[in-house]
Structure formats: structure tokens, C-alpha cells
Amino acid sequence: MARLKVDYGIDLGTTNSAICRMEKGEPVIKKTDTLKDTLPSCVSFTKKKGVRAGDAAYNDLGSDRKRATLTWAKGDQNTFVEFKRTMGTDTHYPSSFMGRSYSSEELSAEVLKTLKSFITDEKFNAVVITVPAKFTVNQKTATMEAARLAGFSQCELLQEPIAAAMAYGVSAQEKDGVWLVFDFGGGTFDAALLRVEDGIMQVFDTEGDNYLGGKDLDFAIVDSIILPYLREHYAIDAILADPARKELLREAMKTYAEKVKNQLSFKKSEDILSNLGELGKDENGEEIELDLTVSQEQTFAAMRPYFQKAVDICKELLRRNNLRGDQLSKLILVGGPTHSPLVRSMLREQVTPNVDHSIDPMTAVASGAALYASTMEVAKDAQEVEIGSVKLKIGYEATSVETNEWVSVKPDHEGTGAKYPDKLWVELVRNDGSWASGKVELLDSGSVIEVQLVEARANSFAVRCYDAQGNILKCFPEEITIIQGSKIAAAPLPYHIGIAVWDERKSRAVFVPMTGLEKNKPVPAIGVRNDRKTSEQLRPEVAKDQLRIPVYQVDGEYREGRTAALYEHVTDVVITGDEVTTLIPAGSPVEVTLKVDTSEQMTLEVYFPTVDISVSKQLDTSKKQSVDEAASLIPKELKQARESLDKLAGNGIAVGALRAELDRVQEEHQHSTEKKAVLQHLKEVLRKIEDLEDGTAWQRIEQGLRSEFNRLEKAQKDFGGEESQAQIEELRSRVDSALRAKDEKLGANLLEEIQGLFFRLTMPVQLMQILQFYHQSFSEHPWRDAQRARQLINRGLSAAKENDVAGMHSSVVALFELLPASEQAKAGGLLG
């Protein structure tokens, strides 16, 4: 059947996926090849170079993972799952059978192709695919690329909690209140707050974690129950000490953990048993075998911290919106792990007693996606119109809270192509057969038909066309659907979007938001920034002249002026001299406009008002984020974070809570293979450290001024003269003024002046100490030229006897140049 609306929705999940189609106004989950509602998001490759996705692949998964422990070789794997967690990164999955590696997008495309194959009665190329609310722009672009690889010419994205709310809202009896969608999936977690008034739903805030889901629950059971059992009964310490072999063992054990997790949602205990020869051998050559009984209490203890993270996210979401749990009308559960009685009881105890599990948590997102798809028009190039059909232009509200709606119908002469009938009548017939509009003559200017809707359901209407003799004609569209009882407002932006600009005071790039692209603004949206200037000139046809505008997205509550690198980088927009026709001098005003569509794809426009030139660019968000780069960055940032905390603590600032958070990230870094997740969690801590630094800046400057001035006065007493005393008195007056005014900028400048004067007063002593140190420990240092070094030390000591400070200084500087870089770093701090 040719369709006017998209009508197909896919929940592309981390562990399970589903496809749903609108049929006669109802969302219908399409069964898989094994007659299930959901398909495992799993892909395997065979020795004969075949590709399998779904249950067949999932059946291969367990044996593939267990087989890897026989050889402890990761390259032997040919079955892959949970690749949604690496979307938008350069992670690749090598298959030994295929002789190549696959990206997350390619594997996701295989899942989409398999879901598509379950539709055998028509061709379709347009679809709505759901994504986590907290997916970044790059991850969403990667999802659209997967859809393209699967053969979809039109793909619209929808946030998963919004889809779930639509599925719930259509049949919900209560049409007013505040709802919270709790979407705990296989690999991601989302929470969304919706305000519902007369059936009209508006998402007004979202929060979540792209690295929190059922996968983490499985590994929690592995790490806290199964691995301790193995350590007690087998020699595996060397295996656990080797990151590669430990990962293989954990992955193999995860298949058992997932089964026991699911069973213990309904039972008090469950046995974990492996077959003889199924697993590899320990370090003593003994075959590893599992034979243990796990209680519900044990698994709940392992899973509780991860569910608590999700609960805490919900509590924070309520707090920042000034809401209490008892003000929630419904807390709607979505996702397989919400079957667990543990999370349900935690939510009732800590958030609200109004926990609702009336919708199927496994298929709600796909159903909502199909409902949303029924409101989206198929692009003309994706429409499959049967030749000879009479084409109509039909306009109507796809969702409504009214019981009557108007439908406009107009002939589409151009779209029909063939000779259009001279006279045409149209009739709309509701799918339950209890209402019909009767035949209405179609005028060239168009006609309007009022339709009656059944409450709280999707109303499907057959579209019938007749010629002057009353013969039924083939027409397009053949059917329209209007959903009564709920109406979803535009989806909101899940992030603040802005750009990075240079901050002279901080000497680094900082984030500034685009006005109009704040978090929770409905999309499509437009943001502007008109207060910037070019830092360099742009000369026509000079490609090396560049204006670079980095675009960032910011999670949670942001603060303008934070270091941009602590946020999620989307892409850089670069404008070169080749793209302008007139010289644009440095310091020219710039007006930046950023447009965001419903799938969060972006276009940036830069306008130079002084020369009346505009440059427009589509943002390329397809660049993959480097996992290796993230892994190498983490140790450096951890080290810098600890140094920052030490400095704050040295100034009397309480940093205990931040140290504990940093320790948790350090531990995660040691055990997790998902370095992108570790880096995200580290950046969250780094932002808190920067906030503490900025928030206590005056306190630290004040302490510094007082302590440094006291040190300066002592140096004056020991080494100063009349000239330096006059300088100190002048500084004292300015310091008093800065302290009274609490002027951070003035205080920081004065601190530099005080330290500079102290250095000049004490320079002879410091130089003398350095010369004496190297004179006494000369043989302990790896000099590049020992003879030259000895000459410089002697020359410096001679200069000291004559109070020749300049001679001492030149000797020390030259001496440092004869040391290796590591030695210079130790000694050169004072004179750098």
C-alpha cells in the first residue's frame, strides 16, 4: 500500500530492537522470524562469509565468547553485540571469518536490514528510528548513517522517552498531570519530564547517561559474584592481571550473568552451570567449570548501585525543576531491566509511589515511534505511488485532542502525471465502519471534510475516489490516520548548544551559548550570537587565512565561560579566504546563526556586516571520535585534576568529596574498556573542579596577597634597601584597596607584582643556592659537557663574591642548558 505518512517506527536498542507499523490506525509490532516481538541487537559472521542478525546470531554469541577462553585470543570472535554504545566513535569490530573489521554503524545497519526483512507485503524506504535522549549530535549522525546503509532514503530520529510517552499517552485515562518516563535500556538510561494538559504532552526536561544500562548490571554480577567464585576455585590471578584476557573472561561470564539476572527478577535463587569443555583452563591447566547457586539477594546487592545512579538522576531532574515526587501523576517504566522488582521498589521508596508498568516496557518505544511516524509525511522521493493512481493533496492534524477535525483535500494534477478526471468525488470512511463522510465533490480549489474521531485511539480513514459514473478509482493516499486523545508538542533539545571563543584572562577557549539554543528549546530551533569579532584577517583567495568556529553541546546546567574542552565537541566550522570576496580585517564584527532541525542536524551561517558578506555551511558531524585519543587523554587529565585539588587544598579549600569522585573515575579507568564513558565521567568531575576554582578565586587571591606580602616584607628586612622599601609601601596601599574592593583582576595583577619584587630581592640568594647545590653534587648530574659546566659554576661563584648578580644569572642560565630536559624541569622552575 502506498503511504502518505512514514508509518514505520524502529526501536534500535543496545540489546534488543523492534519494528512497528501503523495498520488501520493502530501500532502493530511486527513479529521476528522466531515469532518474537523483539530481535536481539546481535550480529554474527559465519565461516562461509554469511551474515546473521537476531536470534541466530545471539545463539552464536554464547559459544563464541566461551570459545575465546579456550585460546585466550580476541581475534577469534565473530559475534558482536551492544555496539550501540560505541556509535559515533572509531571503534571497530574485527571478524576473523570475514577478514575485515566492522564499524558500529555497519553492524547497526545489519540489524536494521533484518528488521526491514520482516515486512514482506510492501516496500518501504522511510522510517522513524529512536535514539536515547542524551545521544550526542555525532551519535545521532552515526544512527542516520546506519539507516542509509540499510537502504532507507528517509530517516527521522525521535528521542526514546518521547516515543514511550506517546505509546502510553494514547490509551491513558488521565489526560492531565506531570509524568516522568524512566527508560532503563540495555545500554543507556534516559529520564524525561512531561507536562500533560488535556492530552497535549510537552517534554520540558530530560536527563540521562549514555553509559548506564543492562550491560552494566550484567558486568556487576560478573565482577561481584562470578569472578570471586572463580578466584576461590581456580588459579586465575594472572588472567585477571592481563587486561586482554580479563576482558575475554568477563565477556564469557556475562552470558551467564544475563540469564541469571533475568531469572532472579521472578525467582529467589538460580543455578549457574557450565558444560564440561565449554570454558578454557586456568593457570594450572585445570578446566574451568561453573557450578554455583546465586540468590536474588546477591544479585540485588550487585545491581543496586547502578539502579541508584538512575534513581539519583531522576531525583536531580525533579530538584532542578522544583518538583517533589508526590507531584508526579505517573512514573512510566520502559526498558527490559525495569522488570526487576528491585528498581520498582527503589523508585517507590525514593521518588514516587505512582509507578506505572501498564505498558510493555520492551515494545513501548517502537510503538511510540510508529505513532510518531504516522504524523510525518513521506518525502516525495521516498513515496511508492502505483502507476495510474489519482494523487491527492491531503492536509490534516495527525494528532488531536478534539473529537472532530477538518481534513482538506485538493487534486494533485502534477503528481498524477496522467490525464486527471474531469469530475472527482472523495469519501472518507472510518476503519470501524460506523462513520463515513459521504461522497464530496472535489473542486480544483480543494474541498474540506469534517471527520468524527473515536476518543483515546488512533482513527484510521480509508480514502475513496469516484469518477462521474461512480466507479472507484485507485488513489494516493489510500488511508490517513488521526490519533485522538494525545498530542505531542515539538521534541526538545537535550543539550545547550554554543561555540568556543578565546578568553584572554583564562588564556584558553571557553564556551558561550547560542541564544535560542538553550536546553529544552523545541526543535527545529535557531540560535544567534552577535557579539563576536574576528581575531585574524580574511583575505580573498588566501586559503591559509581562516576563521575557526568550534561548536559544542553542553549537558546539564552550564555556566558561560567554562573551559570549552570540558564539554562535548561537535565539530569545527572553518571559513577560509577562498570563501570571501572582500578583505575582512581582524577585529571585524561577526554575527553567527546556527540552525538545528528536528534530527539535530545543523547549518551555521556567518555574516560580516561591515562588508555585507554571508557564508553558510552544513555542519559535518560524521567525524568519529577517537577511542585511543580518549584513552591517552584520561591519565593526563587525572594527573592535572589531582594537582588542581592539591592546590585548592593547600589554600584551605575542602576538596574531600571531589577527591572521592576522582578516585571512582580512576577505578573505572582501570577496569573499563569503554574509555569514552570514562572520559565523559572525568569531564563531569573536571567541571566541578573548575567551578570550585572559579568560586573560590577571590578567597585564594586574598590568601595569596596576605601570605606573599608577608613573605615580601621579610625579604625586604633581610635583603632590601630604600628603593625597594618605597615600592613595598606603594604596593601596600594598592593591596589594601584591592582587599576592600574584592577586585579579582586587580588582586591577581598585584600578586604577580609582589612575586616579581620578591624574586628580584631574593635573586642573589636563590642564584647562590643553585650554584652551591651543583658545586657540591657535581658528579651526580649527567652533564652534556662536564668541563664547560665546571667552568660556569666557578665563574658564577666568582661573580657572587663580587655581588655581580647579572654574572651569576647568566652562569646559571647557561648551566641549565647543559642538563638533560628532565633535570632542567627539576631545577628550572624558579628561573623559567
Image (spheres, rainbow, N blue to C red):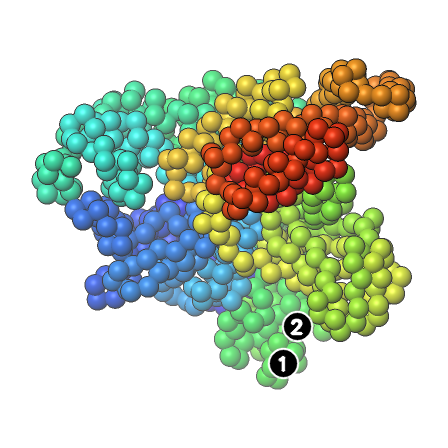
Q: In this view, does 78 lie above or below 696?
A: below
Snapshot quadrant of residue 573 = bottom right
The one nearer the camera, 512 or 493, is: 512
The reply to whether residue 292 is visible in this rendering is: yes
Q: Specify the label residue 614 is tagged with.
A: none
Tell me residue 234's x, y (percent). 16, 31
Instruction: State the separation of the CA atoms marked 1 and 2.
Output: 9 Å
Asked if residue 589 lies left or right of residue 686, the reply is: right
Secondary structure at badge 1 equals loop
Mark positioned earlier in the residue sequence (1 or 2): 2
Secondary structure at badge 2 equals strand
Q: Name the residue under label 1.
A: 420
Tell me residue 723's x, y (percent). 88, 24
Q: Say what amino acid the circle numbered 2 marks.
A: Pro
Do labels 1 and 2 touch, CB within 8 Å?
yes
Snapshot quadrant of residue 832 = top right
- Residue at figure coordinates x 74%, y 33% from the top left: 805
Q: Specify the label residue 411 is tagged with.
A: 2
Asked if residue 59 lies left or right of residue 3, the reply is: left
